[in-house]
Amino acid sequence: METPVTPTLLAAGAPALPHTASNGQLLLAVLLSIGAIVLLITRLKLHPFLALTLGSGLLAAVAGAPFDKLLASFSTGFGATVASVGLLIGLGAMLGKLLADSGGANTIADTVLARTGPKLLPWAMALIAAVLGLPLFFEVGVVLLVPIVLLVARRGNAPLIGIGIPALAGLSVLHGLVPPHPGPLVAVDALHADLGVTLALGLLIAVPTLVVAGPLFGRLAQRWVGPLEIPAETAPVETVKRERTPKFGAVLATILLPVVLMLGKALADVVVDDPKATVQRVFDFIGSPLIALLAATLLGMLTLGRAAGFDKGRISETVGSALGPIAGIVFIVGAGGGFKQTLIDVGVGQAVSEWSGKWHVSALLLGWLIAVLIRLATGSATVATITAAGIVAPLAADMSTSHSALLVLAIGAGSLFLSHVNDAGFWLVKEYFGMSVGQTLKSWSVMETIISVVAIALILPLSLII
């Protein structure tokens, strides 16, 4: 089997970085570069794109790699990551924007809530968040979902935290464990995991994790935090509903289309198991992430945009306006890919592989622990996922399809651990719900930790079964 150390560089025709550094020197290079990234992001407030770029340079310098080879390594990793992940992020943003602007999100919420009694409201909010969270980035999902949470709390005279925690859990679980969110996508790409299998196993892990961290923990958080007043700044304004809104069935079908297509590809690969068979070739094409999300976006222009009365110009403006806000995410992910490739090419991944063999540490647990440490230090789930995936990538080389997918999920679970004051999501939740720092720590931060711990507690025994 070809060594996994430099596949991207060799494919691009670039020479590999010389691996002359000792394991001790490599460990020092990793610690200094990650420490520098943490310092630049948290203390100097430097943009993560610049921090990751500078961290890559420091990593190569301490490891003794020539700078001309560093540039080739970083740019190759950057380009490969943006090419494979950036397109999907863009399509996901377009679909999410159509969902928000057309009123499709409100259609989902209104339909579910109309059929839900007061006792089932937390479960209904978790379900709404999970469905809406499939195509939406976490921050977009929060902005879109919180007004719905506040309206439900006011109309139903329900405790704000009791229904807010399940909604936030639904978004967070999907964000960390289920593609096509940026973190899981980057990990899938770095570990060469099968996207369909990762999606299927991610949903399998996500459901019980959401139940524990959402409705069940929501009851406890409600007692810890106590009653909350809806903040005047974020209080929802009852507006006149749109004359035309998408139908519930059409909205649900559009959101679930890419999921169904990718799961169909994974099922065909298992059942047919013949790459030359016409059926499998068709499913491999329509179930590829790019085609699946492209199909959902094009369908959304009809089922969401046209159904809401948008003309062609308005639809074009809507999907176009989705790209601007995600430029920063694409550059961060790309720089993370460059850092990941530099980690691999200086030999860090191979060293970690040797260490884990000597220590007899489970690759899944190691990936989770590395992601936890980086998450605690940087506050960024995406940075934690990218970095951890780069470090443990060689461990996935000889794994089965299912175990490489579980490694993706283990890293994603670790990236959600204990959101605190260095995480933008912490402050977003605090301000929207009008909580103090202490209340946010007792509710949001504990919820994130429960998601991380429950997910890895499910992933480890599942790896023994499959």
Image (cartoon, grey):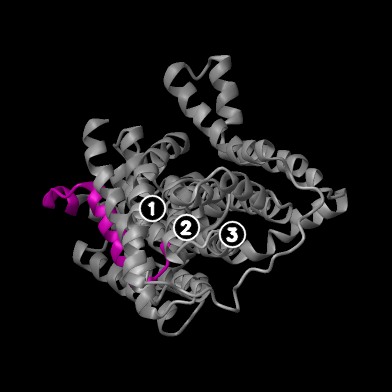
Q: Whole-Å distance between the Cαs marked 3 and 2?
A: 36 Å
Q: From what the image shows, is residue 339 above or below residue 232? A: above
Point out residue 31 in the picture as x, y percentages from the top left corner.
Answer: 28, 71
Q: How many marks?
A: 3
Q: Is residue 266 left or right of residue 245?
A: left
Q: Is residue 90 left or right of residue 267?
A: right
Asked whether 416 or 86 is in front, the reply is 416
Q: Whole-Å distance between the Cαs marked 2 and 1?
A: 36 Å
Which residues make up the magenta segment?
A: 355-381
In the rendered image, which quarter is residue 449 located in? bottom left
- Residue 375 part of the magenta segment: yes
Point out residue 425 in the picture as x, y percentages from the top left corner.
Answer: 47, 69
> In this rendering, does residue 65 appear at all?
no
Which residue does the numbered mark 2 point to in the structure image?
337
Q: Whole-Å distance between the Cαs marked 3 and 1?
A: 17 Å
Which residue does the numbered mark 3 point to in the structure image?
148
Question: How crowded is the residue under tag 1: few (<14 C-alpha within 10 Å), some, or many (20+)?
Answer: many
Marks 3 and 1 close (CB-CB < 8 Å): no
Residue at 61 percent across and 30 percent down: it is 286
Point out residue 366 in the picture as x, y percentages from the top left corner.
Answer: 24, 53
Asked whether 388 or 461 is in front, the reply is 461
Q: What secondary structure characterizes most of the magenta part?
A: helix
Q: Quadrant of the N terminus?
A: top left
Q: Earlier in the sequence, mark 3 or mark 2?
A: 3
Q: Quadrant of the C terminus?
A: top left
Which residue does the numbered mark 1 point to in the structure image?
215
Of tags 2 and 1, the one toward the viewer is: 1
